[in-house]
Image (cartoon, grey):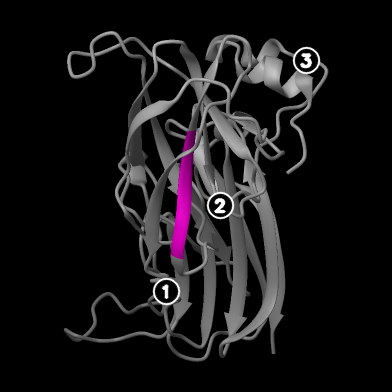
Amino acid sequence: MRRLPQRVVRCAVASLGLLASCDASVTPDLALDATVRVTGGQFFRSEMPSSEDGPAVRALTLSPTVKPGSVGRSCSGVAAASTTSVALALDQDVGFWVVAAGAPDVSAPGFPTFSAEVAFSRAISKGRRSFTARAIDSQGRFGAAFTRVLEVDGVVRSRPQGRLVVALSWDTQADLDLHLVDPKGVEIWKRNINSYERPAGAATEPPGTLHPGGILDFDSNAQCVPDGRSAENVVYADAPPSGHYVARVDTFALCRDAFAHWRLEAFVDDVSVGAAEGTSANADTTYAHDRGAGVRALEFDVP
């Protein structure tokens, strides 16, 4: 295992409020490709040091069952008295996270505690994975690994069935909105969830009448109320109109997250016809969130 650079060690042991000041010229790594993400933690794209001469983690609490794409999972624990921060990592990941150790609580008087929310990528592989916590002292010394075995059940939310499906998903509890403009210029989004337009002069219609068209299936994480989905889909159950489509992603709110990494993909008869990925930042929330909102993320044609 390669040695962790000393600059990284010095940064890792700083209090959480000072981590960003270790090197102001370095852009923080957003860890968009990491299997696990830790809210409020600092990410280091490196292996932890091999030496284990630092303090020990005494306890680690984390639910042992993980679903791909799950967010807001509580992770907490207790460490030895000399601990100033704690490193958290999942085996086979691209790096590790550091969170600050807090004050002792009544359940562990005299011992620093730590607490964080973790999220797991939808790409996490099924099977057993090891989640590790290592205490760090003020000298940058890492202690022995305290490990919990997690069982990833491999249940991935399936894509809805339809002749045309435009699928948006993201990796946090942010409130993102999918907008799709069809070849007739009709925009499908949370305030206009169906592309059907009643024919001119048809004031009423028989009860139970069904109309072809695209339908938005869900307004996910609306008003920052997490629903465990972080996904929205526009689905055409029947043959969609031929022509040019434009899909946009609107960042209504990031909620408690600093960023949200999203993926948008369109499928015609289960065949991908285009995909795009991007990252929503705080600046994206400042624009109007109405018809026409969002960044133009994907364009495609249906024959």
Determine whether the residue tagged by mark 3 lies in a helix, strand or loop. Answer: loop
The answer to whether the residue labelled 1 contacts the one labelled 3, judged by CB atoms less than 8 Å apart, is no
Which mark sits nearer the N-terminus, 2 or 3?
3
Left/right placement of residue 129 relative to residue 59 reads right
Q: Give the x, y percent position of residue 274.
A: 70, 73
Over which residues does the magenta segment extend? 128-133
Q: For mark 1, what is the residue?
A: 197
Determine whether the residue tagged by mark 1 lies in a helix, strand or loop. Answer: loop
Q: Nearer the viewer, mark 1 or mark 3?
A: 3
Q: For mark 2, what is the residue?
A: 91
Give the amino acid at mark 3.
Asp
Determine whether the residue tagged by mark 2 lies in a helix, strand or loop. Answer: loop
Q: Nearer the viewer, mark 1 or mark 2?
A: 2
In this rendering, is residue 217 above or below 267?
above
In this rendering, is residue 246 above or below 214?
above
Q: CA distance from mark 2 to mark 3?
A: 27 Å
Give the amino acid at mark 2.
Asp
Residue 152: quarter of image: bottom left
Disc number placed over residue 23 in the picture, else none: 3
- Quadrant (top left, top right, bottom left, bottom right) of the N terminus: top right
Give the amino acid at mark 1.
Glu
